[in-house]
Amino acid sequence: MKKILFIEDEQSLQKTFEDVLKKEGYEIISALDGEVGLRLIKSEKPDLVLLDLILPKIHGLEVLEKIKKDPETKNIPVIILTNIEGAKDVERALELGATTYLVKTSYALKDIVNKIKKTLER
Amino acid sequence: MLKRILAQLNIIKQCKQYGLSVWQCPQFLFLLMGIVIVAASLSSYLIGIRYVADPYLVSLMVISIVVILFVISFIITQSFERLAEASRMKSEFINVVSHQLRSPITNIKWIADFLTSEDVEMTSEKKQEYIGHLKENTARMVELVDELLVVARIERGGFPVRKKQGSLSSLIRELIKRSKVFAEASNVSLKFYSQKDLSKANFDPALMRMVIENLLDNAIRYTKGKGKIEIYLKKKGDNLLFSIKDNGVGIPKADQTHIFKKFFRSENVLREQTQGSGLGLYIVKSIINASKGRVWFNSVEGKGTTFYFTLPIK
């Protein structure tokens, strides 16, 4: 079973994604802030990380940078899932090695799930 | 070449912060006016010594020109600074509001997507849980819009303070009772000490409710694990003195002068919680000022904060 780490501080979103992704046959691990997220990525070695940018403790871009600098975790695909849509943030995230940058308000839930499936199939 | 020099002085970065062109940027204009003043004083000196015999007259002429130009440049840069500040606040407002509103809107949208998808089977317990999330996110949006409306009223030049005679300690007790669940969930104890036989005061109950709710909410939110909040109310001269003391995260010294500004949230608080508009304390200060009271605080980072306000009894 593929494992997805969801780093997101909105608890209602965590709940929704947990139920949706479990139904699709994935195991989901939740982290409510950047610090916990970094700890879990090392201990759980997920197949994919879904990462919000505005997070308590450590900003999402800093988390992404640390993931991609660490030889143990740099090959784990990271999908940015955020409400920030500044061109600079998109550019920076892709520079740092994010696989995809998705602005939450632009996608329906099933579209996000399809993007996750496509990334995991690669 | 000009751009390189300006970049060295960091002026371009500062101008970008305001979202204005370099020619509207107060720092650039200040630099430009400085150059104009130096050039004007040099040229008036050179012209003066060529055509005017008396050196004292020349120096008087140069000084007058410098003073006049200085005053003009001060007025000009002040006006552009106000324009720049208004532009920066507008951008900040749009960024904060759009993020704070987008989060609950996305949550509601996706929960609705999930609940209405064809192959979802749900127990009634799960349904209730999701309904709870929908209500919570709706409440967040309503709260933000309410705060923005209050801020708009404040900025339009005030709002009516409809004073009525009432008991501030009864209002505080009622609000503490309402916050008990939130406080218990945050593992924070709430105690209220009111002076006995406190006289009634004239205040606007709706506005005072906003003030106390904001201060109480902040104290609970920013006090972690086995925290303690103490509220005191007593008479001091012709005023009632309210204070709320917590042993929470405190406010860093560098942030203390900004704490009542609109949209301001301390770095240490942002690290703990990303939700929050930064409007609460701005609203508190505006209401207390309009009620002819005074609000202030003492805080030590890592140790806690005490907020105070006074309210005239009559």
Image (tube, coloured by chain):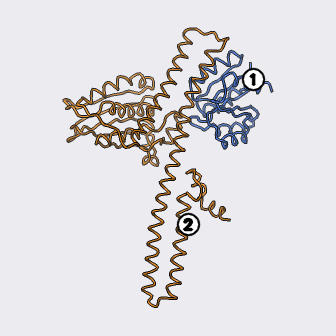
**Direction from residue B233 to residue B14 in the image, left or right:** right
Residue placed at 32% from the left, 41% from the top? Answer: B290
Quarter that holds the N terminus of chain B = bottom right
For residue A64, what is the image quadrant? top right
**Image coordinates for residue B8, horizontal then vertical, percent:** 63, 61
* Image location (x, y in percent) of residue A70: 72, 38
Which numbered dot is residue A62? none
Output the chain of dot 2: B
Judging from the image, what is the letter of the chain drawn in blue?
Answer: A
- Please report, as a chain letter, where disc 1 is located: A
For the residue marked with disc 1, what is the amino acid? Lys
As displayed, is residue B194 above or below residue B285?
above
Question: Quadrant of the image for the C terminus of chain B?
Answer: top left
Residue A88: % across, % down: 66, 44
Q: CA distance from mark 2 to mark 1?
A: 57 Å
- Whether residue B304 is visible to the viewer of this picture, yes or no, is no
The relative height of residue B270 versus residue B115 in the rendered view (above or below) is below
As shown in the figure, which amino acid type bears the numbered disc 2?
Leu
Q: Residue at x 69, y 21 (%)?
A: A110
Q: Which residue is mark 2?
A: B32
Residue at disc 2, secondary structure: helix
> The residue tagged with tag 1: helix, strand or loop?
helix
In which image quadrant can residue A51 be found? top right
Q: Tell me the crowding category of disc 2: few under 14, some 14 to 19, or many 20 or more residues within 10 angstroms, Cα based.
A: few
Nearer to the camera, A92 or B243: A92
Tell me residue B214's x, y (percent). Answer: 39, 33
Quick check: A20 above or below B193? above
Q: Mark 1 — residue?
A: A117
Can residue A37 be seen here? The reply is yes
Most extreme residue toward the bottom, as rendered? B53
Spot the orange chain and give its letter. B
